[in-house]
Image: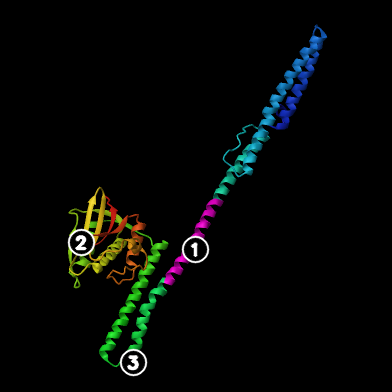
Amino acid sequence: MKLDDNFTFRTVRKKILIISKLAGILLILSYILSTKLEIDPDVSFAVWFAFVIAIVLVVDFLMGHFISKPISKLNQTARKMAKLDFSDPCTITTNDEFGEMAVSLSTMAENLQQALTGLEAANTRLEQDVEQERRLLAERKELVDNLSHEMKTPLGVIRAYAEGLQDEADEAKKQKYSAIIIAETERMSNLITTLLDLSALETGACRLVPERFDFVEFLETVAGRLLIDTPDANFTLQYELPDKRAYVDVDKARMEQVLDNLLVNAKKNVQPGGILKLSLKEQMGTLYFSVYNQGPTIPQENLPKIWTKFYRDVNSQYSGSGLGLAIVAQILSMQNLSYGVENLSDGVQFYFSIPTVK
């Protein structure tokens, strides 16, 4: 130990020893001086007593500054940490045990805060995983229930015609039965494929891949394929499209799926000889698409239901799977695009909007 260390305040013990020694020395010196003074003894005692009081106050102040105040701060910090409050670190900066303890407490508080934050994040992830697992189980059950329900009719038809095919001698009827069986099989296959696709979209297993493309040309191509020069066309096609290009940044393949379902739905529900109208307008950086088919309207109370799986309107001529509009709603929702349906005076109009990009 170096000699100079005896005169430093690097430990609490040394601070107490130095203060007590100085106080003792001052008391002795003050007593000696007061007895040597050539004044009245009572006055001398009063002077010495006043000096003693001053020394006691100074010692009390120093003890409070070096001992009591740091202990109080440490105790306050420890009490907060016991309540898992790590927001107020200890601010003692002395070069002694209290300072080292304050640094240790602050480091421990920081580590505990990080550990607590990590535990909270892990707990949140665990809750999300559990909720995700529950949702997946519910969706799997719903998928199985829907498939079981939807498969009953085509399977019953297939079985009936297969049994009839075994006992039928007429070749023409055999061909008819075979065609019906093939058609029902294809319908089941399409239903399963569509339902699995919708399930993948709902669970997030299928990701969207945005790309930039001209939506006007895209709509012309899709509409031309589905509505123009079709042998079963029994409607008047009207359309209103922009004269210039309008670029968007969305999943092109999925938007084709949206247009396919909306246009086929309109085509199936337009009344014979009625009007089917496409409209695409650009206003203030947004494209507004709508498809209108003249024909029976949808009861107002049923409008919100048409986006749900397997919903079929009793007034609809469309004998599809009941999944097309559910897929439309899912794809548009995943891209944060607004959409809807409304009854007009003599028909139904579906619409959605999509922002343009440069």
**Contact, CB < 8 Å: mark 3 with mark 1?**
no
Segment tinted magenta in the rendering: 119-145
Question: Dot 2 surroundings within 10 Å: few (below 14), some, or many (20 or more)?
Answer: some
Residue under circle 1?
134
N-terminal label among 3 and 2: 3
Q: Which amino acid type corresponds to the residue marked 3 in the rendered image?
A: Asp
From the top left corner, tell me how far across and down residue 333 is, in percent: 35, 57
Residue under circle 3?
167
Q: Which amino acid type corresponds to the residue marked 1 in the rendered image?
A: Arg
* Front residue (pair 304, 129): 304
Considering every residue shown, the one lying at the far bottom of the view is 169
Q: CA distance from mark 3 to mark 1?
A: 49 Å
Quadrant containing the N terminus is top right
From the top left corner, tell me how far across and down residue 169 is, in percent: 29, 93
Task: Say above or below: 101 vs 197.
Answer: above
Residue 156 is drawn in which quadrant? Answer: bottom left
Asked if one can make out residue 104 in the rendered structure from this viewpoint, the answer is: no
Q: Which amino acid type corresponds to the residue marked 2 in the rendered image?
A: Lys
Residue under circle 2?
277
Say left or right for 274 vs 161: left
- The dot on residue 320 is none
